[in-house]
Amino acid sequence: MDRETLLTLGVLGLASLGGCLATVFAAGGQKPDRPIPNAWRLVEPVTYENLSVFPVVSHQGVETTGFVTLDEALASCDAVVTEQGGDIIRRTRDGRPIRDSYPVGGPSVNQLVLINRGSKPLVLLAGELVSGGKHDRVIAKDRIVAPGAPPLPLDVFCVEHGRWSSGSQFAAAKVMVHPSVREKAAVDQKQTEVWAAVRSGTTAKAAPGAATAAPPRISMENIDAAIAGEGRTESYAKLYQSRSVGVPIESFVEEVQRRFARATSNLKAEHVVGVVVAYGGEVAWSDIFASPALFERYWPKLLRSYVVEALARPQLKEHASLDDAREFLRPLQGRENVESEPGVYRWRQVTQGHYAEIELEALRPISVTLHRLKIHRTS
């Protein structure tokens, strides 16, 4: 990518706030069909075993401190998540407590209630885990919840079998489910497929010639042992806590993080805003954010999720190239589905063949695409 192309993309970005994140391709500078608010480029990947992580960097940035993440809001009690039919305490502007019970009815596996009682819009990403209540759940879809909004019926998926008891409140788990599970939540939107992905580890199909690859380091038997643990509950979160998987997940994470930090330490005027992820020679996933600060807030749990997926897939020796990653990021031209809440957010999904891309655009306090996700679907 030459200097002139990057400067051109930067000018276009300043003139196009509120559009989608830029896609920078190989020589030729092909433009995507949608506006470009932020010039960014891919750099050489960080590789470790069968995982390759391509940093996405930008010399521009959007101010995103006006938004709060789910983990931050739950930790500060600015957000409350509870079972349907449970009580939620919120306060008026003058501090008077109001007790809500919303909506009418008892607890539901696939719906919780959320209230944002903070002062900032609350960002939710599909695949984020909340822990507690009757059992652990993951967020079903990217969205934004305005401050002061009424209690929200929140679509979720179960990732814990066997427990339907205890309290009604949820806490931040600081966990993002790994890509195979996240795909089933974000795109397929089916509870049975979400749980099947939890139990299988990965839903990726073996590629031609993959029979000669080393087997996954986390097997289905390892996963069964890890999530079952003691008692009658089977919880996804145990994958990150238990040694039963037989693999030191944190050691893998620490090594990738060390290499990633070293590879991105000399970017000068550029900063990391996202990543493209490949397993073996297959580019499979990308998470790109509106600012370096927002990326950094999600990066620790995203990295751990990518590592679990890598360990659950066959250990292939080949690695995807920079051109493969650029090709992966070409905008799709398939079927489009748009949902929105006026004055709050717009959610857009495009599917084409085995690919899906999802964009979450905030409409206030600024108009900006906060998160862009692209998936090479496993089914």
Image: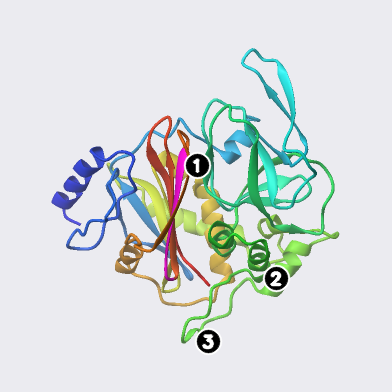
Say few, some or many: other residues with alpha carbon within 10 Å of mark 2 (under 14 / 14 to 19 / 20 or more): some
**Segment colored magenta:** 345-353
Seen at 27% across and 41% down, the residue is 269
Q: Amino acid at mark 3?
A: Ala
Q: Tags 1 and 2 in contact by the CB under 8 Å rule?
A: no
Name the colour scheme: rainbow
Q: Is residue 349 one of those drawn in magenta?
A: yes
Look at 58% across and 79% down and name the residue there: 215
Packing grade of label 1 (10 A; few <14, some 14-19, many >=20) is: some
Measured from the top left, where is residue 25 in percent x and y? 25, 60
Q: Is residue 174 above or below residue 43?
A: above
Q: CA distance from mark 1 to mark 2?
A: 30 Å
Instruction: Tell me if I can see residue 1 in this picture.
Output: yes
Which residue corresponds to mark 3? 211
Distance Cα–Cα, label 2 vs label 3: 20 Å
Mark with earlier residue (3, 1):
3
Evaluate if marks 3 and 1 touch, with contact meaning CB atoms under 8 Å apart: no
Where 15 falls versus 147 (above or below)?
Answer: below
Q: Which residue is mark 1?
A: 297
Frontmost residue, 211 versus 127:
127
- SS at mark 3? helix
* Dot 3 alpha-carbon crowd within 10 angstroms: few under 14, some 14 to 19, many 20 or more: few
Vertically, is 280 above or below 74? below
Assess whether mark 3 and mark 2 are in contact (beta carbons under 8 angstroms): no
Residue, disc 2? 222
Identify which residue, 283 or 89, lies in the foreground.
89
**Is residue 71 located in the magenta-colored stretch of the structure?**
no
Q: Which mark is residue 181?
A: none
Q: Is residue 266 visible?
A: no
Query: In the rendered image, which quarter contains the N terminus?
Result: bottom left
